[in-house]
Structures are given as C-alpha cells and as structure tokens.
Amino acid sequence: MNWEINFGYMPFFYRGQSVSHTPDVDINFGVGDRIQLTYESAWLRVHNPGESVKYGLEQDQLGVKWRFHDSGEEGAQLSLFPQLSVNNPNNAVRRGITPPGASLILPLEFTKKFGPIDMNLEGGYQFVHLGPDGWLAGLVVGHEFTKKLELDSEFYATGTWRPGYAQPTIDVGGRYKLHRPIILLFMAGRGVEPSHSNQPFFVGYFGVQLLLPPKSYDRE
C-alpha cells in the first residue's frame, strides 16, 4: 500500500479574470496492485472584472481508479476512474466560486508504451446535477529522458453538450525526481483559442509529489 500526495499551485488566467488553486491538494492511496483511492480539493482565489477577490474551498473530488486490464509494463493498460465532486458547506456556491450542484465523471483511460514513448489517452462523460452534462478528452505523450527527468506534452479538453461549449488546452510539463521521496511537478500551457474571453491564455501547475513509503521509487 503506497501513498502519493501532491501539493501544487494551479493558475488559470483569462482576459480580465483569474482562478487560482492556492494550493491544490491531491491525495492518492493504492489498495493492492490495481485500485487507487483519490481525494482532491483546493483553496480557490477567484478574481472577476470589477469585483473584489473571492476565496473559498473548491468542490471535494472523490474517486476510485480501477485498472481492470494490464498486459504488463510494455503492454496496454485500461482503467476506469469514476470521480464524484460535491460542494463544501462554506458558502462558495452563494458567492459564485463553485458550481451549484454535484457532478460525476466516468472516464476510461488507455495507457501503452510505444518504444521510448509513453502514451495516455482518456475520454469520458460528466453527469451534472443542476447544470448541463459534459465531456472530457485528453492525450498525453511523454518520454523519460533520464532516470530522474520525464517530459510530457498534452492536449486536454472539457465541454458541455447543451449548450455546446468546449475549452481545449495544450501544454508541456514534466516530473523531476529531486530526492527520495520528493518529485518536482511542473506544467505550463494555454487555451487553443486564447483570444476568446472564455479561453485561458495561461494554465499551469507547479508543485511537489511525495511518494510514501520512500522506497516507492528506486534509489538512483
């Protein structure tokens, strides 16, 4: 049983608006070889044009990742990753910081190694209470340049069905094994159409990952 704990700063900058996770907390706990329990939340800083800055807790996100097919390190892996998001009782909905209702995401993930390239593909449906249902899709392509450094490029998009809306982003990032059990995480990107007011001109993630117990990755 292993813990994977992530602490990060995650900014989303739009024209005249910003939403920042300060910090974002993502806790994962492995149960056996194929199941991972997850919890994620964040302290939000929201700045809208002509308004004072607002602060509040993001929705709590609870998930279970189940890798139901595993062909080994060089083969294909398939996982289901349902995630339930619920509001905290901190008036964040009334102040316009979080959505009014709960939601459930049902994504399917496909992972495979093609020679020196690692590929992760996902797609899923989002059931939303008190709002339009949505979808998500993503593709990550990465390469381990050294035993300490991995770099990735990503295309990720979320959207809704009715009304039709999409927010596609592209980014580059990576992981650097600083010192057991600490890994540095970094990512920077932008919306595909940043000139539109509802598309980000910058998205990022800057944080650390702790793997516990420390033997979770090999000594370099």
Image (spheres, helix red, strand yellow):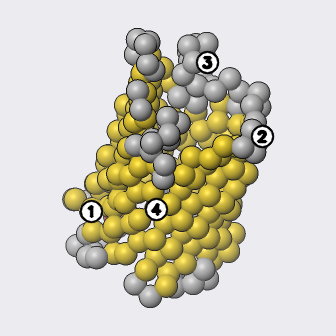
Of tags 1 and 2, the one toward the viewer is 2
Give whichever of 119, 74 is nearer the camera.
119
Specify which label sits upstream in the sequence, 1 or 2. 2
How many neighbours does mark 3 have within 10 angstroms: few (below 14), some (14-19), or many (20 or more)?
some
First-in-chain label (4 vs 3): 3
Q: Locate the C terminus and report the quarter of the image it occupies.
A: bottom left
Gap between marks 4 and 1 measured at Cα: 20 Å
Residue drawn at x 56%, y 13% as measured from the top left: 95
- Does residue 45 sit above or below 160 in this rendering? above
Gap between marks 2 and 4, in whole Å?
26 Å
Mark 2 — residue? 162
Q: Position of residue 48 (x, y in %)?
A: 45, 20
Foreground disc of the pair 2, 4? 2
Callout 3: helix, strand or loop? loop
Query: What amino acid type is highlighted by mark number 4?
Result: Glu
For residue 81, side relative to residue 193 (left or right): right
Upstream in the sequence, badge 4 or badge 1? 4
Residue placed under numbered mark 3 in the picture = 93
Q: Is residue 134 above or below residue 149?
A: above
Task: Check disc 2 and report its element: helix, strand or loop.
Answer: loop
Which of 107/35 is in front? Answer: 107
First in residue order: circle 3 vs circle 1? 3
Q: Is residue 179 left or right of residue 86?
A: left
Q: Find disc 1 in the rendering and name its residue.
A: 177
Most extreme residue toward the front is: 195
Q: CA distance from mark 3 to mark 1?
A: 38 Å
Q: Position of residue 53 (x, y in %)?
A: 40, 16
Horizontal side of 33 relative to 208 (left or right) equals: right
Q: CA distance from mark 4 to mark 3?
A: 31 Å
Name, please, the residue furthest toward the bottom. Answer: 115
